[in-house]
Amino acid sequence: MTRAPFPVREVPENLEVLEIIHSDVCGPMRNTSPGGSKYFVTFTDEKTRYSRVYFLKNKNEVLENFKIYKNEVENFTGKKIKFFQTDNGKGEYCNRVFDQFLQENGIQRRLSAPYTPQQNGLAERMNRTLLEKARCMMTDANVPPSLWAEAVHTANYLRNRTPSRSLNHE
């Protein structure tokens, strides 16, 4: 059973692409993927709700994957990430090396208060949505649990191509 949802917050009209990126790590999963992953991390743009998912063997791989994400999306859009919204994950997000990278790149960190996942709701909901879609596909196709990463990747692919309220169903 889950808590009642918080009210849906409308996306401000003047919000820019890559202005706010939300992120969260999910895992460890019960089964290791064929690639050796036990976790995944999502990076979601608040304006477009477009997300990328990266698979991790350890939580300490988040920064490495954020650097890849940052380069890909900034080169594609010609815009810069301004804010990075996460929870207080001590190992994956809140460390000296990550802080230094954000500072060097002019990205402001926005942290949610401890034990309040609602403050990072977009990222938390993204991970839950991807897991639910992945489980449904895996159950329907009767595939082994070790293929969770492939199912999450496919769920994200499909979700990114589904019309969104934040984009007026475009």
Image: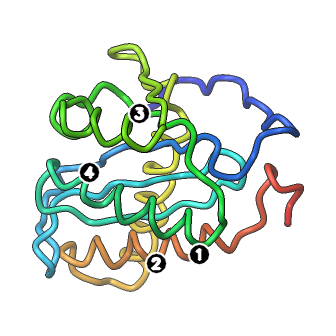
Q: CA distance from mark 1 to mark 3?
A: 24 Å
Element carrying mark 2: helix
Question: Between marks 2 and 1, how big is the CA–CA gap?
Answer: 6 Å
**Rendering quarter of residue 145:** bottom left
Position of 68 compared to 82: left or right?
Answer: left
Pointer 3 or 2: first along the chain: 3
Viewer-side residue, 47 vs 101: 101
Q: Position of residue 49 (x, y in %)?
A: 65, 54
Q: Which mark is residue 82?
A: none
Rendered view: 59 above or below 93: below
Q: Is residue 73 left or right of residue 153?
A: right
Task: Identify which amino acid the numbered label 2 is placed on.
Answer: Thr
Q: In front: 2, or 129? A: 129
Residue at 55% in and 47% down:
81
| Amino acid bearing label 1 | Leu
Are the residues flagged by discs 3 and 2 in contact, CB closer than 8 Å? no
Q: Are marks 4 and 2 in contact (CB under 8 Å)?
A: no
Q: Which mark, by number, is residue 154?
A: 2
- Mark 4 secondary-structure assignment: helix
| Residue type, mark 3 in image | Thr
Q: Secondary structure at mark 1?
A: helix
Kindly identify which numbered label has been placed on residue 63.
4
Count of numbered labels shown in the rendering: 4
Dot label at residue 86: 3
